[in-house]
Amino acid sequence: MNNRLLRYLPLILGACLSSFTLCGTANAELVGTDEVVAPAQAGGDRERVRAFMTRPEVVKQLQAAGVSREEAEARVRAMSDEEVRTIAGKLDALPSGGRLTDFQFVVVVLLFVILLVVLL
């Protein structure tokens, strides 16, 4: 029995050692907050774009351009997360209901001052 064990022991140990070379190595990396938050934020951005698409004035503009609401929603569903994030960012930058941006307000004030100086 002892002789048989000594004969097969190098073969068993060789098989065990060679099986370790088949295993890959594990890598651990730090995950940034933006990588974790991005998928969750993409769902919220997608909902904001969908909500924007259901507004009556937007639906009217889409129909005037020849795009149905269902087709527009299908296009939003087909967009990548990066595209949706870009559009949602542009929605935040849009002025609401005829409100002047800071730049437009400065231009109007400057024009008023120039007209006031020229007329007086």
Image (tube, grey):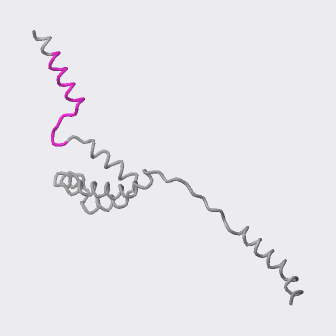
Q: Quadrant of residue 112?
A: top left
In the picture as drawn, the residue positioned furthest to the top comes out as: 120
Left-right relation of 78 to 3: left
Residue 21 shown in magenta: no
- Majority secondary structure of magenta residues: helix
Q: Position of residue 117 (x, y in %)?
A: 14, 11
In the picture as drawn, the residue positioned furthest to the front comes out as: 2
Image quarter of the C terminus: top left
**Residue at screen point 26% across, 63% down:** 70
In the picture as drawn, the residue positioned furthest to the right comes out as: 3
Q: Position of residue 49 (x, y in %)?
A: 28, 54
In the picture as drawn, the residue positioned furthest to the bottom comes out as: 1
Foreground pick, 7 / 57: 7
Left-right relation of 95 to 43: left
Count of numbered tags: 0
Q: Position of residue 15 (x, y in %)?
A: 78, 76
Residue 102 shown in magenta: yes
Q: What range is drawn magenta here?
A: 96-114
Image quarter of the N terminus: bottom right
Left-right relation of 88 to 37: left
Q: Position of residue 105 (x, y in %)?
A: 19, 28
Left-right relation of 89 to 97: right
Q: Quadrant of residue 80?
A: bottom left
* Residue 71 to residue 7: above or below: above
**Residue at screen point 24% across, 60% down:** 69
**Residue at screen point 29% across, 60% down:** 73
